[in-house]
Image: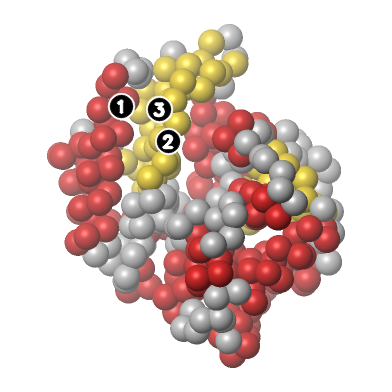
Amino acid sequence: MRIAAIDLGTNTFHLIIVEIKDSAFQVLYKTNQAVKLGEGRINENIIIPPAFERAIICLKAYNETIKSYNVDIVKATATSAVRSANNGQEFIAAAKANANISIEAITGDEEATLIYGGVKLSGAINGKCLIMDIGGGSVEFILCDERQIFWKKSYNIGAARLMQQFFKSDPIADSDKTHIVTHIQHELQDLFSACAAFNPETLIGSAGAFETFAELIEAKYNRVIDIANIKNYTFKHEDYIGISTDIIKSTHQQRSEMKGMIPLRVDMIMMATLITNCILDRLQIADLKLSTYDLKMGIIASYV
């Protein structure tokens, strides 16, 4: 059986095609495209026309690829940008009419469950963990171990939302940092309460910005990392602190010139760094991991 999973994120659309046989899977094809669906007015709950058009063009191309692989099942999930948009249903209808792709706008709770499934499949979970998935529109947190989810929640504090609301300086001013961190801490009070009871020992970052953190660290030491072909990665605490310090003090131009940085994340990485630092500092977690398996792999895991 061949399955295509499409993850319509706020910043990036991902496509993966796998073949499942005897409870195992083989990746046949995967790609992603920086659609930037949340560009411009995500905090006003609007998908602006240029982003709308880019998304439909991307989905048309994905549909052609899916047809060429003779896929049996197509599962397309939309997250924060679509589910919160006033014209989200209009976008879903346009995707079906123009690209022949049926999209399900999933809830934040459903999104967190799929993220857990993907991260679990990567083998990154060992003991009491807090999974964090930093998207453009929302951030999902899952308290878990290898066997089950104990607590989960989605928050509308994604990188694109924070950027549009708070990020006004270059390099980032102390006042902007203070506003962002204060906002994050205010929004996450119930997370901190849940963590106080659960006491997670490891923070696992699900793909996205954490892949960039790993690539920046490896490039800093002139090492090569093949993110596309690894399942997980363990950070040295001092390496993460060092690269996060470099990011926070840098200008837009300096970040764009960092080896390992992709254009989409030049500014988004600042927001991801501030969120990650806030969590590490508040919860006093020293162990940090990356799972390259995320929501789209959670879709695959549900079939495996």
Query: Where is residue 99 drawn, in percent x and y?
Result: 20, 37
Badge 3 marks a residue whose secondary structure is strand
Could you give the CA–CA distance between mark 2 and mark 1, rounded to whole angstroms? 10 Å
Residue found 51% across the figure and 63% down from its top: 256
Displayed quadrant of residue 281: bottom right
- The mark total stands at 3
Kindly identify which residue carries mark 3: 4
Residue found 50% across the figure and 54% down from its top: 262
Badge 2 marks a residue whose secondary structure is strand
Could you give the CA–CA distance between mark 1 and mark 3, rounded to whole angstroms? 10 Å
Q: Residues within 10 Å of mark 3 (few under 14, many from 20)?
A: many
Residue 51 against residue 279 in the figure, above or below: above
Q: Amino acid at mark 3?
A: Ala
Displayed quadrant of residue 287: bottom right
Camera-side residue of 265 and 118: 265
Whichever of labels 1 and 3 marks the residue nearer the N terminus, that label is 3
Can residue 143 be spotted in the picture?
A: no
Q: Are marks 2 and 1 in contact (CB under 8 Å)?
A: yes
Q: Is residue 237 left or right of residue 263?
A: right
Whichever of labels 2 and 1 marks the residue nearer the N terminus, that label is 2
Q: Amino acid at mark 2?
A: Thr
Point out which mark residue 136 bears.
none
Could you give the CA–CA distance between mark 3 and mark 2, rounded to whole angstroms? 11 Å
Query: Where is residue 13 drawn, in percent x and y?
Result: 39, 45
Kindly identify which residue carries mark 2: 31
Q: Residues within 10 Å of mark 2 (few under 14, many from 20)?
A: few
Front of the two marks 1 and 3: 1
Kindly identify which residue carries mark 1: 65
Q: Residues within 10 Å of mark 1 (few under 14, many from 20)?
A: some
